[in-house]
Amino acid sequence: MEKKCVILIFLIFSTHYNVWTQNQLKSKAYYTVTAPSGLTVRSKPSIDGEKLGKFPPGEHLELIKNTEKVLSIVDNGLSVNGNWFKVKRMNHSWDKKPALTGYVFSGYLLKNESRPSNPSDAITIEKSTLNFKNFNLTFYFYEIDNRYEGHNVLKKDTMYVYEDVFNDLSDKLIHIKPKVKIDNVELFYTFKEKVWEYNGDESNSKEPYKWEGNSPFKKLSLAKKMILFPKIEYEKVETSRQVNLKFRDTLVHYPGEMGGTTATMSYNGRPCVHFISDVILKIVLHHSNGTTEIKYININLSYGC
């Protein structure tokens, strides 16, 4: 009887501990630095606090404590309001140095929807700026691959760029900086998707199946002409499209010495491949003279080396 009681108490404690741990993880808040020149870290929640360093724009921070101490400043004639936050930087996974911890002004922070991937563990911690006639668009902790022919070339209203290998756009800070006087700027995004017949035989009289398209554009809410790009839920988008097109799992067999079997999907009995190939950004500038300017950025996503 005593043994059963001990086991029961252990199970109850384990259950409560697991629930507590999950709640703790859910309750953690993360923010991204938006100050273009970086955000000063201080030893105490006051402008008199010793400067411990600076967080660059695009850096992800974990909130330790909201001190509730209010601070208001004027930046280029505009009032910026916020609190003093105690935060720590999300360090490199391989970095053994203590994470930089201190107090920062929350007026230059954007809250992440969930725990972001660590930008310092990405291919680069650099920034990339795309130059248009009337505005610049900057990605922080994100590098554009300039090795491709025709990179960063504006064709009609669209600039075509290539991301660096595995440099996911999710949670990256985007800043649109107009070069001319405007009333408003808007940012939209969508995904370009492709479907084609797997290992289509050109000698076959039947034309290989191909499809390319995109879903409607979604609007992103800019704050001081900045935004955190949402997580790209590849599997969710692909699964939705596969359901709509009534794809089915299948196997494809290769004949010959280098032959084998690979898993893919079928559409109307024909093996097909489907994936998200690009992210398309749509930038709308509303000029002070009443005219509207629209430009697009087509980012080709990398899936491997």
Image: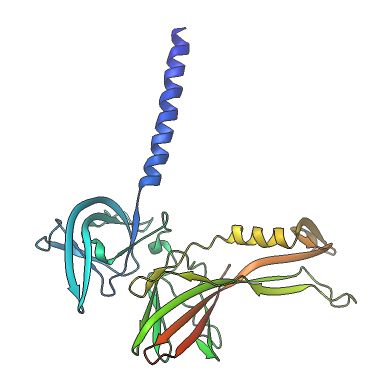
Name the image quarter holding the C terminus. bottom right
Q: Is residue 171 above or below residue 278?
A: above
Which of the two residues, 243 or 126, is positioned nearer the viewer here?
Answer: 243
Determine which quarter of the picture holds residue 126. bottom left
Q: Picture coordinates of residue 186 (x, y %)? A: 44, 77
Write the residue at 84% across / 62% down. Answer: 269
133 vs 213, left or right, is left
Q: Is residue 155 above or below residue 274?
A: below
Q: Is residue 174 above or below residue 90?
A: below
234 vs 35, left or right, is right
Furthest residue in direction right, as rendered: 205
Write the residue at 40% across / 31% down. Answer: 17
Determine which quarter of the picture holds residue 184. bottom left
Write the residue at 78% across / 69% down. Answer: 199
Q: Picture coordinates of residue 265 (x, y %)? A: 75, 60
Q: Picture coordinates of residue 55 (x, y %)? A: 27, 65
25 vs 231, left or right, is left
Write the residue at 64% across / 61% down. Answer: 238
Furthest residue in direction front, as rendered: 290
Which of the two residues, 74 or 291, is positioned nearer the viewer here?
Answer: 291
Determine which quarter of the picture holds residue 74. bottom left
Which of the two residues, 244 or 247, is positioned nearer the viewer here?
Answer: 244
